[in-house]
Image (cartoon, rainbow, N blue to C red):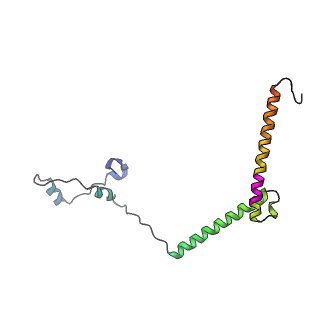
């Protein structure tokens, strides 16, 4: 990451300030100047900013969180099963496996009805375009 690609907020503090004795040493013509290493520029942080570290959860805390997530998942699944039971005709009297099978059959039946309606619609539209066959009038 280059100095120019950093947000303006962070650009001002990238070059560390040197003590006056070091500045005099660097300013003399007898010494060689070296550019700062890229690792120093990357690791430099503006004043007041600290590196964040993640805290590890204890095994107990992690297992409690996992069990809460599992409970939420189970409740969500139960709610969805109840919703299916109300949507699918006769679903309230079915067990989960039978409910899923009946849901699949119900979806296929609805798709067949949709296709039949599309065919009828296109037939009626084509009939209305013909002057010979008029329905209802």
**Dominant secondary structure of the magenta stretch?**
helix
Q: Residue at x 38, y 50 (%)?
A: 7
Direction from residue 6 to residue 131 in the image, left or right? right
Residue 132 x/y as whole percent: 86, 24
| Pick the front one: 78 or 99 | 99
Compared to 26, does 96 lie above or below? below
Compared to 35, does 118 lie above or below? above
Residue 80 x/y as whole percent: 71, 60
Q: Quadrant of residue 82?
A: bottom right
- Outermost left residue: 30
Q: Which residues are magenta?
A: 100-107
Q: Residue at x 75, y 59 (%)?
A: 101
Direction from residue 117 to residue 65 in the image, left or right? left
| Pick the front one: 16 or 119 | 119
- Outermost right residue: 137
Q: Quadrant of residue 30?
A: bottom left
Q: Residue at x 74, y 55 (%)?
A: 104
| Pick the front one: 29 or 121 | 121
- Outermost bottom residue: 60
Direction from residue 9 to residue 90 in the image, left or right? right
Say whether residue 35 is magenta: no
Residue 59 x/y as whole percent: 51, 75
Residue 93 x/y as whole percent: 82, 64
Q: Residue at x 79, y 38 (%)?
A: 119
């Amino acid at each position: 990451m280059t100095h120019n690609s950093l947000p303006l907020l962070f650009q001002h503090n990238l070059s560390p300030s040197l003590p006056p004795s070091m500045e005099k040493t660097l300013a003399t013509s007898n010494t060689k100047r070296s550019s700062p290493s890229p690792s120093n520029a990357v690791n430099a942080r503006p004043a007041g900013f600290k590196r964040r570290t993640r805290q590890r959860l204890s095994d107990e805390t992690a297992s409690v969180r996992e069990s809460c997530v599992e409970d939420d998942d189970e409740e969500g699944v139960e709610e969805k099963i109840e919703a299916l039971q109300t949507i699918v005709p006769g679903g309230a009297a079915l067990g989960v496996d039978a409910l899923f099978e009946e849901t699949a059959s119900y979806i296929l039946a609805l798709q067949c009805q949709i296709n039949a309606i599309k065919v009828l619609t296109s037939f009626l539209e084509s009939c209305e375009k013909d002057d010979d066959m008029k329905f209802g009038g």
